[in-house]
Amino acid sequence: DGGITQSPKYLFRKEGQNVTLSCEQNLNHDAMYWYRQDPGQGLRLIYYSQIVNDFQKGDIAEGYSVSREKKESFPLTVTSAQKNPTAFYLCATKRERDYNSPLHFGNGTRLTVT
Amino acid sequence: SQQGEEDPQALSIQEGENATMNCSYKTSINNLQWYRQNSGRGLVHLILIRSNEREKHSGRLRVTLDTSKKSSSLLITASRAADTASYFCATDSPSNTGKLIFGQGTTLQVKP
């Protein structure tokens, strides 16, 4: 999706290091989401934010942290406490005021931790 | 928590045939959405059906929703090789407003 930029596309880190994944949007959407995708599984929600300076834990928040200082940006930090961080990470946005609006996704960051 | 269960997990058909994927869910919903994912890419929204709707069409896509059975189906007619992708259903429920819960997906292969 041209309106959501995730960087980098591929990221390699050594075990024990924290790493931050970037998500920037120019869609002027209020809500932003981080999902994790593992092979053979669907998407699982890590964190989401419906407004600047506020965010909530999703289903698998342990070992992750986020911030929402600007409407356009919602970075995700994968900490050394995350036991199995290797995965495909997807950022999404939603026009929150429209109750039935869909999610818009970035093209993901594939994180490999060795 | 995974709300949606999709069936089949994998589907292989010839170009020109129809492809049907099913999704079942557990709790009441506001709407159900279908997304497509090409390998290594983000998801793309295909169609949204509200809880008070029973059928919706978009081009070669037809989605049905049966709230009494808590199930939905996605039909792709006259499939093309370019339809090869993974397809996911996702539900937005009153108890989880703002949080879409995704199924595990159906991988569709369309052979030319």
Image: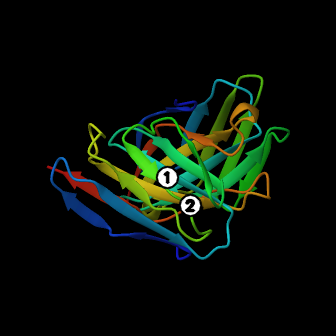
Along the line of sight, the residue nearer the viewer: A32 or B52: A32
- Label 1 Cα neighbours within 10 Å, binned few <14 / some 14-19 / many ≥20: many
Give percent across and percent down for residue B87: 50, 48
Compare marks 2 and 1 and give the one earlier in the sequence. Answer: 1
Side of B53 where B65 appears, left or right: left
Give percent across and percent down for residue A58: 53, 39
Q: What residue does disc 1 label?
A: A34
Asked if marks 2 and 1 fall on the same chain, the answer is yes
Instruction: Tell whether label 1 touches label 2 (CB within 8 Å).
Output: no
Give percent across and percent down for residue B14: 42, 52
Side of B62 where A78 appears, left or right: left
Judging from the image, mark 1 belongs to the subunit labelled A
Along the line of sight, the residue nearer the viewer: A58 or B33: A58
Q: What residue does disc 2 label?
A: A68
The type of residue carrying mark 2 is: Arg
Q: Say which element carries label 2.
A: loop
| Quadrant of the rendered image containing residue A108 | bottom left
Q: Is residue A5 above or below residue B12?
A: below
Along the line of sight, the residue nearer the viewer: A11 or B22: A11
